[in-house]
Image: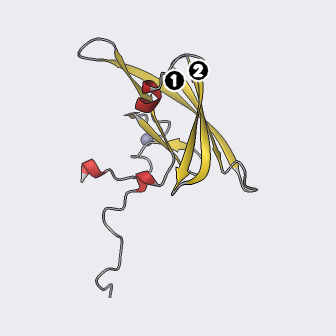
């Protein structure tokens, strides 16, 4: 029958659940320099769940996600992500990641169980879209 309160809860935001790589954050930290390696630690509810090593190469970045490095069931996968640039209105260029799944220009990629993909590929909702 499906009474009141059953079914999917609206407004559940999966974005907070999956670890992600935010290009704007990397850029702000000056980590988008060729040859630069940075490590992003991922937490969920204040618990350490894994880390992503980001290596910047010419026109692409290599993302190595290591889930639960200290646990027996740890997993590691590597995704190569191409970068593209669009000119800004006030000069300079804006970098984007090309999602390895759908090739959209995105600023954030999320770590799934086996690969990095954008929110469209993972069907994540965003509050600003609601
Ligand atoms: Zn995608």
Disc 1 is placed on an element classified as loop
Labels 1 and 2 touching (C-beta < 8 A): yes
Disc 2 is placed on an element classified as loop
Q: Kindly give the residue lying farthest to the right in the view shown.
A: 72
Q: Which residue is mark 1?
A: 31
Q: Nearer the viewer, residue 34 or 99?
A: 34
Above or below, 7 relative to 70: below
Disc 1 residue lies near ligand 1 with CB under 8 A: no
Crowd band around label 1 with a 10 angstrom C-alpha radius: few (<14), some (14–19), many (20+): some
Q: Kindly give the residue lying farthest to the bottom in the view shown.
A: 1
Image quadrant where residue 78 sits: top right
Above or below, 48 relative to 82: below
The quadrant of the picture occupied by the C terminus is bottom left
Q: Nearer the viewer, residue 28 or 60?
A: 28
Give how far across and how far down residue 117 sits, in percent: 48, 42
Q: Residue at x 36, y 62 (%)?
A: 12
Give the numbered dot on residue 36: 2
The quadrant of the picture occupied by the N terminus is bottom left
Give how far across and how far down residue 26 sits, in percent: 47, 29
Residue 51 falls left or right of residue 2: right
Above or below, 13 relative to 102: below
Q: Where does ligand 1 appear, by image quarter? A: top left
Mark 1 or mark 2, earlier in chain:
1
Give how far across and how far down residue 103 sits, in percent: 43, 34
């Amino acid at each position: 029958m499906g009474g009141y309160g059953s079914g999917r809860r609206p407004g559940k935001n999966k974005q907070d659940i999956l670890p992600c790589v935010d290009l704007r954050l990397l850029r702000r930290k000056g980590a988008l320099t060729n040859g630069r390696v940075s490590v992003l630690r991922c937490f969920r509810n204040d618990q350490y769940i894994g880390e992503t090593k980001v290596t910047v190469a010419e026109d692409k970045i290599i993302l190595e996600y290591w889930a639960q490095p200290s646990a027996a069931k740890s997993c590691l996968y590597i995704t190569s992500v191409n970068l593209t640039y669009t000119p800004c209105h006030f000069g300079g260029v804006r970098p984007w990641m090309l999602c390895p799944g759908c090739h959209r220009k995105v600023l954030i990629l999320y770590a799934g169980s086996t690969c990095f993909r954008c929110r469209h590929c993972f069907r994540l909702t965003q509050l600003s879209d609601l």
